[in-house]
Image: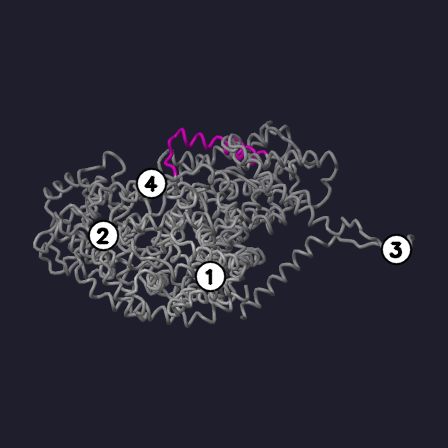
Amino acid sequence: MYQNKHSIFLIILLGFIIHKYYCKEQTYEHKPNKPLRFHVAEFNFDHVSDVYAITLWILLGSLAKIGFHLSHRLTEKFPESCLLIILGLIVGGLLYVTHLTEQKAYVLNSDTFFLFLLPPIILEAGYFMPNRPFFDNLGTILLLAIVNTLFNTICIGLTLWGFQFTPLYGGTQFEMLPCLVFAALISAVDPVAVLATFSEIHVNDMLYIVVFGESLLNDAVSVVLYRMFASFANIGQPNIIVMDIVLGCLSFFVVALGGVLIGIIFGVIGCFTTKFTEHTPVLEPLIVLVYAYLAYLTSEMVSVSGILAITFCGMVMKQYVSFNISKKSDATTEYVLKMLSSIMETIIFMFMGLSTVSDSHSWNTGFVFMTILLCLVFRVIGIAIFANIANCWRLLELTRIDMLIMSYGGLRGAIAFALALVLDEAKIARKKEFVTATIAVVFFTVFIQGITIGPLVKLLNVRRKQIEEPTMSAKLTNRMMDHVMTCLEEISGSGGSNSLRDRVRNLDRNYFKRWLLREPPDRKDIKLLQTFKKINTLTAMRVHDTARGLVPSASTATVQQGIPEHHHLRSHSAYGNVSELIAANLPENTVPDLMSYENHEGEHHHNDAEMHHFLDTNLYSARPRAAIHLRNQDETGSSDDGTHARFEKSYHHRDQRYLPTRLERELPHGPKTISKTIHNANRPIGLTNSSPKHTRSPPTTHQQPNPRSRSRSIAAHQHSPIPSGQRTKSISKDSRISPLASTHIENEGTGRTAAERSRPWRHLSITEETGASSSKTANIPLANGNDPNLHHIPLTVADFGGTYTKSPEYMGEYATTTKPEEPSSRPDVRDIFNKQSEDVSEQQDDGSTESITRL
Amino acid sequence: MGSNASIMLQQEDLQNICQQTGFTGKQVQRLYSRFKLLDKRDCGYLTREDLLIIPEVNINPLGERLIDVIMEDYGENNQINFKQFMYLLAKFRQGKIKSSITNYNTRESKLRFLFDMYDRNHDMKIDRTELLDVLKMMVGGNIHEDQIATIADHTIGELDKDGDKSITFEEFCKTLERIDADDKMSMKFLS
């Protein structure tokens, strides 16, 4: 509760700051000479002008982005950043002609840039940082980021200054310190530009992370150098004493380590806060954003590197927050981050083009060309030197081609531009030249290098990033390799990074996870299990696609025959979880429609979205079915073929009859539904429980007209939008024929929310069992219609056990394997599960209902 | 101790090992001193206990399995002498550059080592039981057997192409094509 208030307070504070910042020029004037009369409507542009302009910018940026991607030919040839800059140039030209440029909202202002535009991009980069490659390459990254940037700055600065003694600059004088200031801002590789370019060319992870990591971490160096040289320029060259230089070097450590520290502190606090947000899940994404932003602002306030702070804040949070917050919040956070960073990036590039068109330029051909040339040359030299040094300890050595791409990928961007804009013209006389040269370099790198790097990568045959689906075997073997290598390193006494990683992992498991997670990890390998869960979800998605798009026909049925038998093993006994059930009945090589879009980024997010989507679309059919088929199902088909047939039919049947038109329209467009699922965020609680049953239940409507009409009536009166809480109850009401079934459904429904997000696995086990048992209970009354023998059997836990172990298929499963003792151990298993599910459901009862009402 | 150890290693042995494994002389000497360090009783071979005493190996979930593999496949009678020890480690040299590849550190031999981690009965197939054993070691005791079994089934389903419910070495290699096993199964030997 305290955190709740805390964050609300923060929002208000933020709102206030934004308000103050943007709206201070608001005026409410009345003309005194006119008599006051009532106006029906007033035109009041001044009142909204600034915010209006900003909103229009965002809209323009989004529309531009959408527009570019409509044309494949355009985006294939040119990176998005180039197109945006061109658009900015065009708009800037228009504004310049119409003299609107004087207005504040139309130029890139370095405060706006550093306070609003930059942080979301960096946060996104930090949050989605591939940790493993980052830390594997940390040594190289640090070397490049620190030493290489320093080397570049000094070399570029001194060479530029040196050339003033030649007639190259046409007689314009440049002093040494301003040259160094300029070199400091121009030699840092820009994360925004690198991100924009590299996300389109898909080089391998290692190469990407080395360049991108360098661009992120060199911020500390460039900030320090920039500030140091700028203040030296203020002090004046003759007055500098050695002490200043020593302090300058010292300030590097303060800036870098301070930024990292602040980031980690805020990250940890953020994680700790999410430990208590169980009852206010709507605020969870906000917590992540606000703490990260606060980390950035705080470090800017104490003038340490904000970029480092927000990067590390994001990295820390990602590690723990996603375990704490609900799945929906997790998806929302990721989506909001992606959205913000994408729009900010768009705006930055657009504004760069825009701000180029202005009067404050001073073109000095010699200086501009020297700058571009020196940037290129020293980048190549620097990389060649330091990459070779790094190769001495690197396991995977950087090849010549890697080095070439690394030096070619050294793009400069908006940060340099914004820094150039804040130069003080009173102290640095050549500001205009510097700004022009910066723009020239940025345009050169973004246009020439940005456009050609893609073909170059192709030409040189650089190893591309493989878009891999998570496979269980890959994850397992990967993990095994880690373990084996750690051991062997220890045995051979090499003590490399493998054992260091293990030590960090132990620390993480023993301390951080314990303090920061709601549910301390009681397992050895969460990641392994996560992968498994992810795969399950994915597979479920695919089935759903086939079931929806092309209703499984004879052809898919034949494919299903082909898959190994163990896939069907449990379909009659223990499937409770939707995805698991479906995964089992799934042809492995169905067409992954939904997965084909934008598969290089945000995979995680899509999985979530699809999960919701999947559940969402199943909702409408599930409810009526749960009610109707409880009575009328005939449990005859027990062979594998039967399952398939049932599965097909149930889907077919659902599509024809229960799928509301709204959903039908939306289904073909995967991504669209994301917004909808977020909007419906509280719904899946109610859905999940019903899905297993409708997929399992054989369609009877074709044979029996009577129940069909009944089902329709129930369906009709339940189609009215009901909040999820009631929905769960309505199911239990409908299925009151078997009270036990209804309680199980309830258990599952309520037990899901919290258990799911904190302990995905244990939760799976719960649903597996409760789901299985509820479907059992569902099946028994269903069978009643045809089988009088089953009519009066009281439904107890023992009963489930009976069907469980008696099932011939089930025995078959274990008969084929070498574990004959398994069946006897089953009853215990069930008891454990049942107990667990009851416990959990009891615990979660209050919590989940509360969260529903709040939502 | 280091200087002592290098004296004890015969010159021709050293050359022999260098030639076969591709290690440099310095690397061999360094590893020899490490070997002597592990060999607490100074008897010229390492036993299971010698390896298990290393803290990292001791707590590693796959430590014991790894020692099984080392002792059974590379040593004999639960002992491993220095030469065998070197043959074992030679598998994990980097094999990126053509000239550094011997017949020990090919990609296949590295994968084979991984495969052997599963396949303890040497029938060139990973069957369900073997997979389950490894899985249990890796995920720990808190997860229910049912779930582990499901994971195992799923994994086999992923890899198994010919439907015999076990994973052959070819199937194993095929799915690991996309993983850079070569890099990951290599380590840097200090010289």
> Which of marks 3 and 4 precedes in the sequence?
3
Q: What secondary structure predominates along the stretch shown in magenta?
A: helix
Q: Same subunit under labels 4 and 3?
A: yes
- Tag 3, which secondary structure? loop
Please name which of the two marks, 1 or 3, marks the residue nearer to the observer. Answer: 1
Question: Are dots 2 and 4 in contact, CB under 8 Å?
Answer: no
Q: Which residue is mark 1?
A: A686
> Which of marks 4 and 2 precedes in the sequence?
2
Q: Which residue is mark 3?
A: A37
Q: Which residue is mark 2?
A: A488
Q: Position of residue A737 (x, y in %)?
A: 40, 67
- Tag 4, which secondary structure? helix
Q: Is residue A669 above or below residue A28?
A: above
Cα distance between the residues tagged 3 and 2: 88 Å
Q: Which residue is mark 4?
A: A554
> Which of marks 3 and 1 precedes in the sequence?
3
> Which of marks 4 and 1 precedes in the sequence?
4
Q: Same subunit under labels 2 and 4?
A: yes
Cα distance between the residues tagged 1 and 2: 50 Å
Please name which of the two marks, 3 or 2, marks the residue nearer to the observer. Answer: 3
Q: Position of residue A369 (x, y in %)?
A: 56, 29
- Tag 2, which secondary structure? helix
Cα distance between the residues tagged 4 and 3: 77 Å
Chain letter of the residue beneath label 1 in the structure image: A
